Amino acid sequence: MILLRKLLFPFAILYGFITSLRNYLYDKGIFKSYSFDIPVIAVGNLNVGGTGKTPQIEYLIRLLSPKYKVATLSRGYKRKSEGFILANEKATAETIGDEPFQYYKKFSNIQVAVDANRKNGIEQLLAQSSKPEIILLDDAFQHRKVKAGFYILLTAYGDLFSDDFILPTGNLRESRDGAKRANLIIVTKCPSDLSIQEQENIKKKIGINLPIFFSCIDYDDKVYNDAENLTIGEVKATQKILLAGIANPKPFFQFLQAEKDETMTFDDHHHFTESEINRIKECAKNKIIITTEKDFVRLEAELLKAQLYYLPIKSKLLVNQETFDQTILNYVGTSTRNR
């Protein structure tokens, strides 16, 4: 695979040229970007793969929704529908996508919408009788047709965009220079004990004069289903199946796994077939199954609800949380007043 990626280097140069030209045309106004008279925060990344966008969107929801009417807008990756959809009681993971459906189930006080055309999605949200005061764009860093008011760029610890190269030789969706469009950068999935010195070293490696924050995954102390919950201690003492369809399941498994537990791994955003569901049931038999939140919303209708649990996670800033929160609140407050 490494050799193949090196052989594809000429295509990476071509791809880099095309994406850089596209960005240049947007920067110069030749391609039109649309802005809106409402605070719009875009969360995204340069790398292909999981950088922790979902827990970061949820962090912003928790920060902002007590004071403002918040809406999330995603493309609805791998959904079996098209166009604009505003989530309601009929929504499923198949109609709006697993991550938007997760937002909808967890946060009853926000609007959740999907539309691959973010401009149309925002217009549709603002046409609602109860329109939002803030829109959070999920995975929209490269969606230049909409000009957000504030950009948060995520890059995973151990997989920094500054160490990567453009597709297909590397995993970057665009040149590393694209990071300059961000208002701030968060290095996600850090060890919880990451030292201040190592944080400074990473800042130097990234080499961009922007505020840089560091976050880790904070696991809940219980697992849940719709009927009950179990403590992590109880879970670790119980023989079980651990199941994940996420970009990097290793930390999830390590947090919960005991010696005799079996793990089952699927692709990110995986849609489970009937044969796969039957295989999961056969492996589990009388054991409990622990999965991730976004896998749970796809599986809960297919498996015994008393058997299936999920482990919630949150994004937790290692230091300077008050500074980060105030930066976001200052942008929202200023934008709202300027309206």
Image: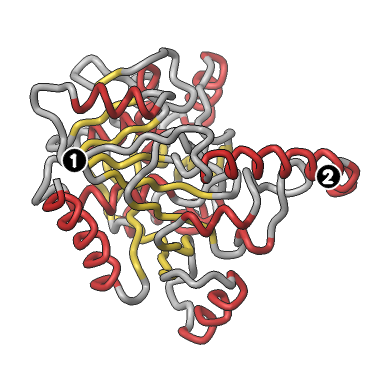
Q: Can residue 307 be seen in this view?
A: no
- Quadrant of the image for the N terminus? top right
Q: Can residue 94 be seen in this view?
A: yes
| Disc sitting over residue 5 in the figure | 2
User: Residue 92: x and y, percent?
Assistant: 32, 20
Above or below: residue 41 compared with residue 295 = below
SS for callout 2: helix
| Disc sitting over residue 209 in the figure | none
Mark 1 surroundings within 10 Å by alpha-carbon count, few (fewer than 14), some (14 through 19), many (20 or more): many
Residue depicted at 41% across the width and 69% down the height:
213
Distance between mark 2 and mark 1 Cα atoms: 42 Å
User: Residue 250: x and y, percent?
Assistant: 56, 53
User: Residue 283: x and y, percent?
Assistant: 53, 30
Above or below: residue 30 compared with residue 48 = above
Side (left or right) of 159 relative to 193 = right
Q: Nearer the viewer, residue 241 or 216?
A: 216
Q: Mark 1 points at which residue?
A: 70
Above or below: residue 265 compared with residue 328 = above
Side (left or right) of 225 relative to 191 = left
